[in-house]
Image (spheres, helix red, strand yellow):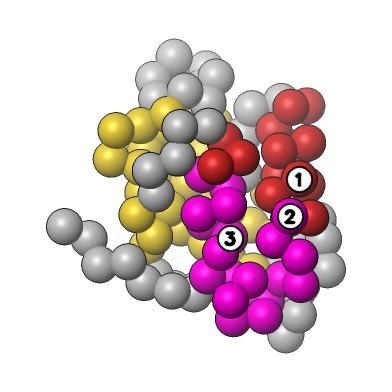
């Protein structure tokens, strides 16, 4: 089983059944390390971006991204692994298992 690592540079095992749930799990370590001030604001920004167009590009991978204030740098990164996979409306129709989340 993957170790649940907090913060940038680690892989976070996520289990959410929806995009907002997955976003919250991926962003929680960034919030706990004070990289993002508001967890709710970040989840909302990612969810609104995802509603415009899916950030899944196929091959079981998505790159959700949004712009909000980031503390201590220009960008905050979180990598999530969803073992079961989640429907993210990928062009190839496959569920997403790997998320590279970018907040800038």
Residue 90 in sight here: yes
Q: Closer to the N terminus: mark 1 or mark 3? A: 3
Q: Secondary structure at mark 3?
A: helix
In the visual, does 100 lie left or right of 68? left
Query: Which quadrant holds residue 52?
Result: top right
Q: Name the side, left or right, on which 104 lies relative to 33.
A: right
Q: The N terminus lies in which quarter of the figure?
A: bottom left
Find the magenta span and give its range: 22-40
- Tally the numbered discs: 3
The disc at residue 44 is 1
Q: Can you give x and y, in whole percent of width and height, for residue 91 in the image?
A: 52, 17
Element type at mark 1 = helix
Question: Looking at this view, is 91 or 23 the one in front?
Answer: 23
Which residue is identified by label 2? 40
Left or right of 25 on screen, residue 36: right
**Vertical placement of residue 92 versus 49, above or below:** above
């Amino acid at each position: 089983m993957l170790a649940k690592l907090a913060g940038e540079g680690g892989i976070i095992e996520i289990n959410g059944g929806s995009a907002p749930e997955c976003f919250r799990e991926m962003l929680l370590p960034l919030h706990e390390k004070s990289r993002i001030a508001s967890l709710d604001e970040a989840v909302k920004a990612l969810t609104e971006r995802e509603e415009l167009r899916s950030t899944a590009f196929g091959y079981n991978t998505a790159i959700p991204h949004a712009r909000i204030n980031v503390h201590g740098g220009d960008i905050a990164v979180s990598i999530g692994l969803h073992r079961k996979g989640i429907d993210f409306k990928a062009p190839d129709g496959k569920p997403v298992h790997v998320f590279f989340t970018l907040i800038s």
